[in-house]
Image (cartoon, rainbow, N blue to C red):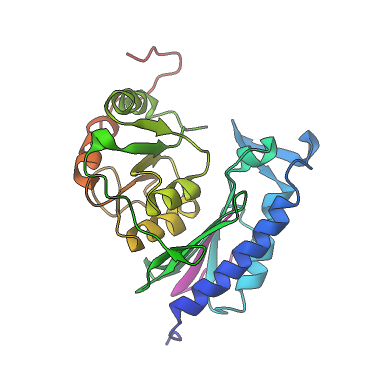
């Protein structure tokens, strides 16, 4: 039988690991050259810093919960846990990192069976540590955070991310952007989904949506949004946002309307054909 894990202690351990890893990453900003960058696909990059950071996290977290496995972006560990798995993005915002632009984040979540029980997002550029654990509050650098109180989509500031390799849904996505450009306070794209979600959790953004994301991009941030009083779902309002490669997150007040607006466009079957004009 699995040992009962103290979620707060696990979160605190992940916080320290995220800080330490973030310091390592920050020390290499503006110090890498083109020969240090490997392409995993169009506009999808990895550096030795990503891999080293992931190895650092795995090495440090292994003794925290010895039975736990890892779901990690760079695949430096193949260990899978029966009950517990850490979900890790060692460097969310690699394109930002190689260009010397913020934000750049470390994202660590702990999953118990199919439920996230702790989440940490460390935005290293501004030294901002967002975190929460099951049955706890959500915090930023020790201060409690909550989602915004905005109650109208038209008064919301929206965050999203642009696809860099999967353009199958680009036509409805561009139509959704057109709608939100015209009917909200604006749309922002930072280049780190983990930071986007953390900013929803602390009320800087009112809502966020994106498709083609991986579990390590969203696990910690989505959990912190929920712990801060927000709501999270896939584009159809279901719970398949962790592995389903689509996510909507917002405060509770605008969630229904925002989800409906996103779904109006993103649940269309229309796909992008190379060279097709977007109408």
81 is within the stretch colored magenta: yes
Q: Nearer the viewer, residue 225 or 75?
A: 225
**Numbered circles on residues, count:** 0
Q: Which residues are magenta?
A: 78-91
Please determine whether, in this image, residue 176 is positioned above or below residue 153. above
Could you tell me which quadrant the C terminus lies in? top left
Residue plotted at (69% across, 58% down): 23
Could you tell me which quadrant the N terminus lies in? bottom left
Please determine whether, in this image, residue 81 is positioned above or below residue 223. below
Decide if residue 7 is on the left or right side of residue 179: right
Decide if residue 173 is on the left or right side of residue 110: left
Give residue 220's quadrant in the image: bottom left
Give residue 262's quadrant in the image: top left
Percent from the top left, x then y, of residue 74? Answer: 62, 52
Residue plotted at (36% across, 42% down): 208
Residue plotted at (45% across, 65% down): 143
Decide if residue 218 is on the left or right side of residue 227: right
88 is within the stretch colored magenta: yes
Q: Nearer the viewer, residue 109 or 13?
A: 13
Percent from the top left, x then y, of residue 268? Answer: 25, 30
Can residue 125 be seen in this snapshot?
A: yes
Q: Residue furthest front?
A: 143
Decide if residue 35 is on the left or right side of residue 212: right
Can residue 52 be seen in this snapshot?
A: no
Residue plotted at (44% across, 55% down): 221
Percent from the top left, x then y, of residue 139? Answer: 44, 64
Percent from the top left, x then y, of residue 226? Answer: 33, 59
Q: Nearer the viewer, residue 22 or 2?
A: 22
């Amino acid at each position: 039988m699995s040992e009962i894990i103290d979620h707060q202690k696990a979160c605190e351990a992940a916080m320290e690991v995220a800080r330490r890893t973030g310091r390592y990453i920050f020390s290499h900003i503006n110090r890498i050259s083109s020969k240090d960058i490997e392409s995993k696909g169009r506009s999808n990059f990895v550096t030795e810093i990503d891999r080293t950071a992931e190895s650092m996290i795995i090495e440090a977290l292994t003794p925290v919960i010895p039975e736990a496995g890892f779901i990690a972006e760079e695949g430096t560990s193949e260990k899978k846990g029966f009950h517990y798995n850490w979900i890790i993005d060692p460097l969310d915002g690699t394109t930002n990192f190689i260009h010397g632009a913020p934000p750049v984040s470390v994202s660590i979540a702990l999953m118990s069976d199919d439920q996230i029980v702790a989440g940490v997002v460390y935005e290293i550029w501004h030294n901002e540590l967002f975190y929460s654990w099951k049955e706890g509050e959500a915090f930023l650098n020790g201060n409690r955070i909550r989602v915004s109180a905005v109650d109208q989509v038209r008064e919301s500031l929206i965050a999203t991310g642009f696809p860099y390799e999967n353009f199958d849904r680009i036509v409805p996505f561009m139509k959704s952007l057109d709608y939100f450009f015209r009917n909200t306070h604006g749309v922002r794209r930072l280049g780190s989904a983990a930071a986007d979600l953390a900013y929803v959790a602390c009320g800087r953004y009112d809502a966020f949506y994106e498709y083609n994301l991986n579990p390590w991009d969203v696990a910690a941030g989505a959990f912190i949004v929920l712990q801060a009083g927000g709501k999270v779902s896939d584009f159809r309002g279901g719970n398949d946002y962790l592995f389903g490669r689509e996510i909507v997150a917002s405060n509770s007040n605008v969630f229904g309307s925002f989800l409906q607006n996103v779904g109006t466009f993103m649940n269309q079957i229309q796909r992008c054909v190379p060279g097709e004009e977007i109408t």
